[in-house]
């Protein structure tokens, strides 16, 4: 299955979210949050003095956005002001990244754990996959009132995150662990009963952004490959969607939930992304609609 291009000429697209008939996404190095309609009418929704990443909405409709380098979650108020929702800097040891906001307004945010570009420059990209690499990080739980706690530790570069429709299971992509990890979600939002959901090491797929479909399968953006793959619990891959370049995030949306939106780019390296505009959003139609959060 192949994709078509919906949006191009961006620095680095990330964290696609379907809402009210439009796809919202962040452009890291463009310092802006965009939305785009099915016909490609792209508009800037918000500009930041930081790199935006994770997106989500509180139950009352206010937008939350991760400010990566400040290690904050910011909240867009009805008057257009952007205010601090949560400070994550006392937990996050390096830049923050993906975020999932559940139906109650609880946000789950990951962080890099280390300066990836500097580590790769010194040790090489292959060293990141070593069990000895200092890549452990946290999933942080931000309560609706902005208080923050550690939800899960010793996560090897937490990235895309989903919650099942019943709100009881959270699945997080451990990019450098080459796996998807699941937790039970307690009534208070805390994560319990950590377990392996899918081992992707035999396919050498470092999972980046992910989304969930109505049959309980997870679509995974392959951060080293030009594809998204559909994975069942246990690790079986049932479908592949080929993209024009490396895939970094995905989400299901559209009128019937069967449009797979994929954020792609030639590279995630900061200097190259800042200088060039290779990032795109590509689309394909799949058989099973999206479900759960986001």
Image: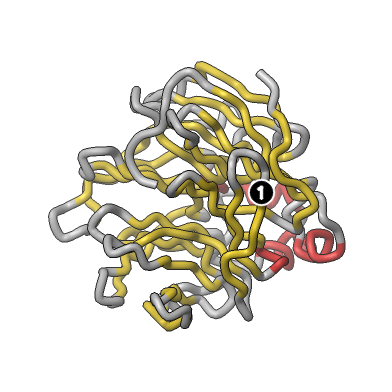
Left or right: where does residue 225 sit relative to residue 201?
right
Q: Give the colour scheme of this rendering.
A: secondary structure
Left or right: where does residue 152 sit relative to residue 28?
left
Q: Quadrant of the N terminus?
A: top right
Which quadrant would residue 143 be assigned to in this image? Answer: bottom left
Q: Is residue 90 visible?
A: no
At horizontal 67% and vertical 37% (from top left) the residue drawn is 282
Q: Is residue 226 visible?
A: yes
- Percent across and percent down for residue 162 are 38, 44
Which quadrant would residue 269 be assigned to in this image? Answer: bottom right
Left or right: where does residue 180 sit relative to residue 275?
left
Q: Residues within 10 Å of mark 1 (few under 14, many from 20)?
A: few
Looking at the image, residue 18 lies above or below residue 76? above
Depth check: 119 or 273 in front?
Answer: 273
Residue extending farthest right: 275
Looking at the image, residue 254 lies above or below residue 189? above
At horizontal 52% and vertical 67% (from top left) the residue drawn is 96
Left or right: where does residue 151 sit relative to residue 93?
left
Q: Give the number of callouts.
A: 1
At horizontal 47% and vertical 26% (from top left) the residue drawn is 231
- Percent across and percent down for residue 237 are 51, 20
Q: Which residue is mark 1?
A: 41
- Percent across and percent down for residue 221 are 59, 38
Q: Secondary structure at mark 1?
A: loop
At horizontal 42% and vertical 66% (from top left) the residue drawn is 63
């Amino acid at each position: 299955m192949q994709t078509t291009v919906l949006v191009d000429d961006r620095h680095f697209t990330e964290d696609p979210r379907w809402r009210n008939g439009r796809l919202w996404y962040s452009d890291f190095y463009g310092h802006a949050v965009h939305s785009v309609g099915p016909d490609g009418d792209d508009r800037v929704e918000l500009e930041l003095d930081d790199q935006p990443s994770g997106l989500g909405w509180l139950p009352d409709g206010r937008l939350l956005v991760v400010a990566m380098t400040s290690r904050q979650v910011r909240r867009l108020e009805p008057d257009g002001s952007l205010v601090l929702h949560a400070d994550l800097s006392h937990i996050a040891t390096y830049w923050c990244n993906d975020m999932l906001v559940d139906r109650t307004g609880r946000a789950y945010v990951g962080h890099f754990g280390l300066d990836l570009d500097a580590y790769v420059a010194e040790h090489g990209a292959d060293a990141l996959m070593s069990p000895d690499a200092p890549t452990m990080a946290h999933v942080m739980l931000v309560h609706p009132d902005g208080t923050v706690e550690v939800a899960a530790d010793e996560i090897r570069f937490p990235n895309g995150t989903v919650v099942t429709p019943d709100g009881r299971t959270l699945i997080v992509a451990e990019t450098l662990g080459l796996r998807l990890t699941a937790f039970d979600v307690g009534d208070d939002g805390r994560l319990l009963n950590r377990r392996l959901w899918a081992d992707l090491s035999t396919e050498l797929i470092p999972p980046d952004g992910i989304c969930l479909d109505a049959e309980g399968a997870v679509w995974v953006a392959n951060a080293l490959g030009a594809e998204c793959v559909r994975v069942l619990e246990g690790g079986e891959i049932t479908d592949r969607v080929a993209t024009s370049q490396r895939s970094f995030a995905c989400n299901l949306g559209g009128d019937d939930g069967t449009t797979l939106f994929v954020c792609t780019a030639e590279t995630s390296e900061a200097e190259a992304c800042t200088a060039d505009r290779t990032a795109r959003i590509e689309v394909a139609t799949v058989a099973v609609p999206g479900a759960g959060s986001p």
